[in-house]
Amino acid sequence: MKELKQIHSHMIRTGLVDSSDARRRLLAFCCAHKSCDMNYAQHLFEEMPNPDPFLWNSMIRGYSNSNSPEAAVSMYIHMLARGFEPNVYTFPFLLKAFTRDAVIAWGDELHAHVLKFGLGSNAHVRNALIHMYACSGDIETAQHLFERSYKREAVMWNAMISGHNRNKQFEMSCKIFVDMVKQCVSPTAITYISVISACAKLRDLDFGIQVHKHIEESGTLPNLKIENALVDMYAECCDMDAALRLFEGMKTRDVISWTALVVGFARLGQIDRAKQLFNQMPERDAVSWTAMIDGYVRTNQFKEALEMFRDMQTQDFRPDEFTMVSVLTACAQLGALEMGNWVRVYMDRHKIKMDVFVQNALIDMYSKCGRVKTGLEIFHKMHERDKFTWTAMIVGLAINGRGEDALQLFNKMLRASESPDEVTFIGVLTACAHAGACRVHGNAEMAELAAKNLLELEPENGIIGDSFCIDGK
């Protein structure tokens, strides 16, 4: 954008800015840029005396590239109000950045506009609709449009595979890939990357190997993005020998290639091998640093995890929410309250996303550091909770001697239709064992429920006997 503004300044000084064609090109280039300054683009647009559909589409594209579906729709409405009709380029640009909320607000109406202006049979427009519905979670509508498409090009298949991936329906992604190949539609690089990602999430090594073979036979390699996806898939499937062989055979590598290996070895607890690769990396990013921190946490080397985090900051790499979950886990295990408090302030100061995973880690950290009241404050302020949130708070209350509160929260968890797991049941039994709460408060049935479920999940867990001995069972 800096260079673009310099070109604009030169055009003003030389009088080229008076050329309508030059200004059109400048605006189109600005809006096509991924990091477009839309305030600047809007200024350029407003200087155009008679914007045509090309310029309106450029502005819609710019707002979509900026992940601003509301602004893109607003521009589209202004376009209609000025008497211009959409064309085959308008909707692909407009629908590109639609989120689930945007689809709920405008999806059906814009779909009606597609039909109204006779654009429903256009392959690019139809694909944009399929992509919009699939990626927003409305797989049924996407599938309906897909099945009614006369000619299914690769881009439509890709939209369906990506949509199922986004909705964590990875088996369906693999099935659609198989159907695509059976119908003799040639997969693209995007197809391969998407289906490899599905294999990785499923940890389906056998199918991943089949896809790899198909890629080699297609002559698509070398392709850095596909090769990175394959290294990641083998690492996710714990086949580090295959991941390493592929990595060593790559003609070109980048930070993603290296990080996939570091993550793979760290996940398997081979932290020394991960550190060796990490030290060899020509360049690093926040993901590679986080992989090492998480690796130390996974191998119970919590002090080393915090040391790695300090090194990360010293070298001016900015952590993200994933980094912070690992750091807070290390603080929890070490009882490092002061460091945990500092991390919370740091996240607030640097506007790091406080998602449900970070807040769960904060609850766990404060509970294990004896500050369960602070953990409760975070719990009550959360707008979104999952079963791990409830479990962290139940266990936190239990280990801090607040058995009655833990049991009351467990009841609320059940009423909220959250499914407890073995850790939740351990928390419930800990609450009983610590204070005899089951006997005193008549909650023997709750203890029996927890014990029964825990016995099925962990037959050797000793806390079952402890809690029932306390209650005289």
Image (cartoon, rainbow, N blue to C red):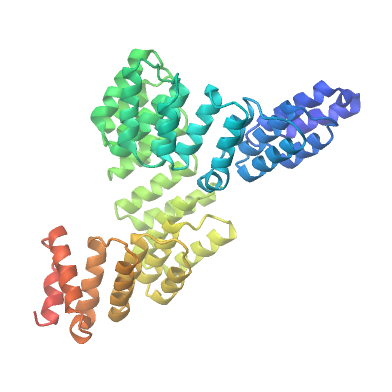
Figure quadrant of residue 170: top left
Please, is residue 410 above or below residue 126 in the view? below
Residue 109 spot, x, y in % from top left: 58, 41
What residue is at 78 percent from the left and 25 percent from the top? Answer: 24
Residue 51 spot, x, y in % from top left: 79, 30
What residue is at 11 percent from the left and 62 percent from the top? Answer: 460
What residue is at 30 percent from the left and 29 percent from the top? Answer: 175
What residue is at 69 percent from the left and 32 percent from the top? Answer: 31
Q: State left or right for residue 421 relative to residue 351.
A: left
Q: Going by the picture, which residue comes out furthest to the bottom?
A: 440
Residue 260 spot, x, y in % from top left: 38, 35
Which one is nearer the viewer's eye here, 176 or 77? 77
Please, is residue 314 above or below residue 9 in the view? below
Please, is residue 399 above or below residue 298 in the view? below
Q: Going by the picture, which residue comes out furthest to the front?
A: 116
The answer to whether residue 282 is visible is no
Q: Quadrant of the N terminus?
A: top right
The answer to whether residue 91 is visible is yes
Please, is residue 4 above or below residue 428 in the view? above
Q: State left or right for residue 435 relative to residue 165.
A: left
Figure quadrant of residue 396: bottom left
Q: Quadrant of the C terminus?
A: bottom left
Q: State left or right for residue 315 relative to residue 190.
A: right
Which one is nearer the viewer's eye here, 194 or 169? 169
Which one is nearer the viewer's eye here, 336 or 80? 80
